[in-house]
Amino acid sequence: MPTLPSVVEIILGILVLFGGGELFVAGSVALSLLLGIPQLVIGLTVVSLGTSAPELFVSLLSTIQGDADLAVSNVVGSNIFNILVVLGASAAIVPLRVQSRLVRRDVPLLLGISMAVWGMASGGRLTWQAGVALLFALVANVVWEMRTASEDPPEAAEEIEEGRSTPMVATLKLAAGLALLVFGSQLLVKGATTAAVALGVSQTVIGLTIVAAGTSMPELVTSLVAAYRGRADLAIGNVVGSNLLNQVLILGLCAVVSGGKGLAVDPVMISRDLPIMVATTLACLPIFWTNGAISRLEGWLLLGLYGLYLVEQVLAATAGGEIMDNAYRFVVLVAVLPLLMVFMVWQVLRWKQQRKLLAVQGGD
């Protein structure tokens, strides 16, 4: 069993990271406005970086300390959590209307990056050259966003304007947020490492579950609040943008920092968790495409899938649970997966039928 100090360190680390992320975003936005940086650039870089800051600092610190398993599993676990839990919980509150831009551009881009990361990691490590390529992809994407985006929505502009402040206050918020992020990441990594040793499980399992969920709290809170206020674009865009940034920025930076030895990737993660990350991203396309919205039913379905994923993680980490884990995977493959495929095909067919009825009514 994990010791009480390790549990306290994990909880405190998550709370400190959350507070640090809030201050970091507020200070960064205010300072950017004072420097005259366009609001579009702020939204594409500073705000997205703010929600991904906990993952960034935890993974970077883990890489520097030689805990590559925790660094990579934090990113992969966060991406899975964001799609299945953050999107699922947001849609369970209110159906989320999906903008066509997400289906045409952003989700396919995220899927392509996810498949590229899986391919680059298949050799057992992410090299510094792969890291440079991911960082180049980040720069190219920001430039592309700036050239193709029309203009900020009025609501977003109003929210950003609220971030205006004096230079001194903005700098203090930025510095305080940075300090809290560093301190919180140290607490969380230390507590997670101690808990992994006490439980007798790998840091990969801890990173994919506890640490990933903890560092994804900013995304969860942001999307839930956005969904409750009827801002579906923010709820979905927050998830897609964060998942993209987690891979091109965080994994890219960690791979470069790891130097010549590269960033080691657990073989289990290559064969199980990275494919799941790609599959959850791929599943977004038909869900987003049909009816142009994520329904409450689809939201609960995403939450249920994350429950299945957690059960698999627990069985895999349990001593002597290999037989149970294999049996569980067999049941998922022969029962759950076919039902999921049938549901998705049914959704697509129903959507096409509705389109035909609308076309007929329009012709009349």
Image: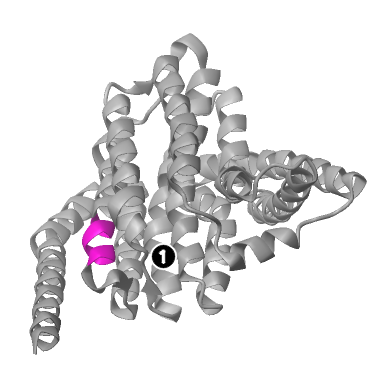
- One can see residue 19 in this view: yes
Q: Residue at x 52, y 26 (%)?
A: 254
Please state which of residues 276 and 203 is positioned toward the viewer in this rendering.
276
Badge 1 amino acid: Leu
Magenta range is: 283-289
Residue denoted by label 1: 87
Q: Residue at x 53, y 48 (%)?
A: 211
Please state which of residues 307 and 89 is positioned toward the viewer in this rendering.
89
Q: Main secondary structure of the magenta part?
A: helix
Task: From the top left corner, tell me how far across and down residue 80 is, in percent.
Answer: 38, 52
Quarter of the image that includes the C terminus = bottom left
Task: From the top left corner, tell me how far across and down residue 196 is, in percent.
Answer: 51, 42
- For residue 286: magenta? yes
Above or below residue 328? Residue 182 is above
Please state which of residues 320 and 112 is positioned toward the viewer in this rendering.
112
Task: Tell me: 139 left or right of 62.
Answer: left
Task: Tell me: 259 left or right of 278.
Answer: right
Quarter of the figure with residue 201:
top left
Q: Residue at x 59, y 41 (%)?
A: 194
